[in-house]
Image (spheres, rainbow, N blue to C red):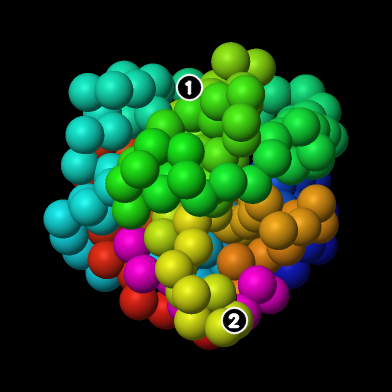
Amino acid sequence: MKQNEMPKGKKGAISALRAATIVIAGASTLLSSGTAYAAGSYFVPNKGQVSAPPGARALCKTYQWACSSSRKQAAIPGEMQLVSKINSYVNRTTKPIEDSRQYGVKERWAMPTRRGGDCEDYVLAKKHALIGRGISPQRLLIATVLDRKRNSHAVLVYRSAQGDLILDNVTNRIKTWKDTRYLFLRMQDPNNPAHWVNVFSGG
């Protein structure tokens, strides 16, 4: 063996070590980019705890499932298609009617009746249907917003792996939360939907 020649076994060990280093470095890069992605503008920001909207303060007592938590967070097969189908179905089968006409009060969050419902009622119907199909309630979050005309409105935030998507009763098209151009005010806490978080972002 020549003086500067390395034994074959040692060469193989060093090659394997270099390969492992490359893999580890690549994994670190992916993890770093994933963390930045999850914390970026793809998701509705969480600016800390806030009180529930007036209409939602009795929500957890009336509909326990609307405020429930689940350990299961993974997506189910065909989830996006299911979300789109439920969004369109509820929009198509629920007639719009104001709470003042249906209940004689300014604000009441409830499931739609045969007469229909307002924006919060659409949201509850969609959330209930999607939870029943196996989607984690912590990935289906009610949010209050101001629409493009700065009217009070409510939507359902579907937390996908790619970011927060919005189910809205005014359209069957599912958009990213920023593409709605709504001003998001409050949202159910993803860690505990019985609580609410301040958002005040978008628009």
Q: Position of residue 134 (x, y in %)?
A: 60, 18
Q: Is residue 117 left or right of residue 185?
A: right
User: For this view, does 149 lie left or right of residue 3?
Assistant: left
As for residue 114 lying within the magenta part, the answer is: no
At mark 2, the secondary structure is loop
For the residues bearing labels 2 and 1, Cβ distance under 8 angstroms: no
Quadrant of the rendered image containing residue 93: top right
- Residue shown at the point (74%, 68%) measured from the top left: 4
Q: Position of residue 60 (x, y in %)?
A: 26, 28
Of the residues shown, which amino acid type is indicated by label 1?
A: Lys
Q: Residues within 10 Å of mark 1 (few under 14, many from 20)?
A: few
How many labels sit on residues? 2
Q: Give the residue at mark 2.
A: 148
Element class at badge 1? loop
In this picture, residue 13 sits left or right of residue 107: right
Q: Quadrant of residue 59?
A: top left
The image's mark for residue 104 is: none
Residue 75 visible to an observer of this rendering:
yes
Badge 2 or badge 1: first in the primary sequence: 1
Q: Which label sits in the foreground, 2 or 1?
A: 2
The kind of residue on which mark 2 rests is Arg
- Image-based side of 78 in relation to 186, left or right: right
Is the N terminus in the top left, top right, bottom left or bottom right quadrant?
bottom right
Answer whether residue 188 is visible to the viewer in this image: no
CA gap, disc 2 and disc 1: 35 Å
Per the rendered image, the range of residues in magenta is 179-186
**Magenta stretch: residue 182 in it?**
yes
Percent x, y of residue 164: 58, 57
Residue that carries the numbered disc 1 in the rendered image: 72
Residue ID at (31%, 46%): 105
Q: Nearer the viewer, residue 100 or 80?
A: 100
